[in-house]
Image (cartoon, rainbow, N blue to C red):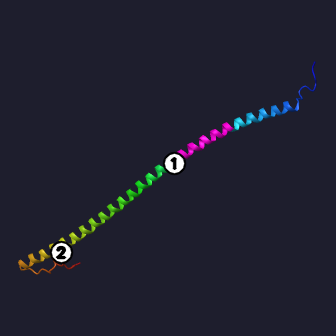
Amino acid sequence: MHCEFCWIKTPLETCRHQLRMYENEFGALTLKLERALENVQGLVRDNDALTIERNSLRAELTAAKNEAAEADRRANDITINTNWELMAKGRHISHLATEIKTLKGENPFAPSIPHQRDIS
């Protein structure tokens, strides 16, 4: 015999059915939460690794900047010393040239190239 109200369940059956639906939903949400937690933990591990790498690269960059600054200071010192040495050698050469002219009986202060008038 077919009853037209057979689809209507007792209150206890309705509660049990609703409970099974909640349990299924809770299980699905728990699974999603576990996956999300694994993703977050993976992101935290990745972030930690990237932070370590960043700090290492910062330290390398700082060391490279310090080395470059020291090399620049040394290059400046070399340039300054070279310029002083060249000036000293120039003075010494000038002094020797003056002595040579004096020993030859020439005027050391006379121009080395005779002055020529413009005849045009």
Q: Quadrant of the C terminus?
A: bottom left
Q: Which residue is mark 2?
A: 91
Which residue is at a point 21% across and 72% down the rendered structure image?
87
Q: What residue sits 24% from the left and 68% below the top? A: 81
- Separation (CA) of disc 1 from disc 2: 64 Å
* Crowd rating for badge 2 (residues with CA inside 10 Å; few <14, some 14–19, many 20+): few
Q: Amino acid at mark 1?
A: Asp
Q: Position of residue 94 (x, y in %)?
A: 16, 75
Q: Position of residue 78 (x, y in %)?
A: 26, 65
Decide: is 86 above or below 46.
below
- Picture quadrant of residue 5: top right
The magenta segment is 30-46
The residue carrying pointer 1 sits among few (fewer than 14), some (14 to 19) or many (20 or more) residues within 10 Å by Cα, namely few
Given residues 119 and 42, the one toward you in this image is: 42
SS label for mark 2: helix
- Whole-percent x, y for residue 1 in the image: 93, 18
Quadrant of the rendered image containing residue 83: bottom left
| Residue where numbered disc 1 is placed | 48
Please identify the dominant SS of the magenta region. Answer: helix
Residue 119 vs residue 54, the one in the foreground: 54
The answer to whether 75 appears left or right of 105 in the picture is right
Q: Would residue 94 appear left or right of 76 to someone viewing this image?
A: left
Tell me if 96 is positioned left or right of 3 in this view: left
